[in-house]
Image: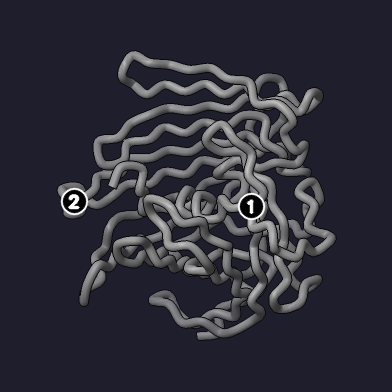
Amino acid sequence: MRKATLFIPVLLATAMMTSAPDTKVVPGGEMCQVQKDAFQAGESLTYKVYYNAGPMWVGAGEVYFKLHDIDHKGKKTLYGVSEAVSYSSFDWFFKVRDKLETYMDPVTLQSYEFKRDVYEGGYTFYRSYDWDRKTNTIISFEDRKNGKTKTETITGVDPCATDLLSVFYWARTIDFEKYKVGDKIPVSLAADDKVYDIYIKYEGKEEYKTKQGTFRCMKVKPLLVEGQVFRSGEGMTIWFTDDDNRIPVRIESQLLVGRITCDLKSYSGIKYPFTAKVK
């Protein structure tokens, strides 16, 4: 199960890594255009992750997202950090200790720097991206923690490309009211020393029940590419709250072995009243 992380946002971003050449691209999904102001510094979200490979669902761990305003290398940035930790009761099966960090422009959400520190089932590595927005290049540094390091320059990067963590926040700014059911919204993602053209399919509105209650939601489906973890097709579904916060309350995905669910467990510091909860 090497690299088969059970946690978001890596789960979300990795799942969407597909060029999908037959996809109808809908105008208005430009990455530099932040369509809705959905969050603020001080926000904290916690998710509980469940794994299923048979008749029972097992609590696998938790993932945390936090936002802060900080000065970074002479720039005012919106700093996002996410940590994924498997429960000790799940560590025997697949131990996860992941940390993602991104330093974003507070207005455009363009990344200045991204860091990823990974421990997944004994597989470890560290990766960082330093963006040069003037030349549309990324300096990628990788340390496999076995004495081998690698530095590469990625050229021709979409000026509005996201990273594995900033894409989580950018997706929350999409104004789904502009789209019809079935529309596919393009996204550019820098990951694993490549830049991917990915898409999010809008599925419409519905009320959805989770362990935290029933919510008015916007339902979307990323297109999946088959690999070590996922089945190809539209096997992942995400429910964003249908309010100004656009918080994902649930993520479900079919894996090659089993299924996974990520449920919102707690939140604080959100920008707007949580009006999407109906009961």
**Are there few (<14), some (14-19), or many (20+) residues within 10 Å of tag 2?**
few
Report if residue 81 is visible in the image: yes
Question: Reading the chain from its start, which is encountered first: label 1 or label 2?
Answer: 1
Q: Which mark is residue 93?
A: 2
x, y (%) of residue 134? 81, 24
Gap between marks 1 and 2 measured at Cα? 33 Å
Q: Where 27 falls versus 228 (above or below)?
A: below
Q: Where 185 falls versus 138 (above or below)?
A: below
The reply, left or right, for residue 102 in relation to residue 1 is right
The reply, left or right, for residue 8 in relation to residue 90 is right
Seen from this angle, which residue lies furthest right? 27
Rendered residue at 50%/49% (across/down): 14
Rendered residue at 69%/63% (across/down): 22
Q: Label 1's element?
A: loop
- Tell me which colouring the rendered structure shows: one colour
**Are there few (<14), some (14-19), or many (20+) residues within 10 Å of tag 1?**
some
Q: Label 2's element?
A: helix
Quarter location, residue 244: bottom right
Rendered residue at 25%/71% (across/down): 57
Report if residue 45 is visible in the image: no
Marks 1, 2: nearer the viewer: 1
Q: Would you name the residue on which mark 1 appears?
A: 19
Quarter location, residue 176: bottom right
x, y (%) of residue 152? 57, 20
Q: Amino acid at mark 1?
A: Ser
x, y (%) of residue 70? 63, 32
Q: Amino acid at mark 2?
A: Phe
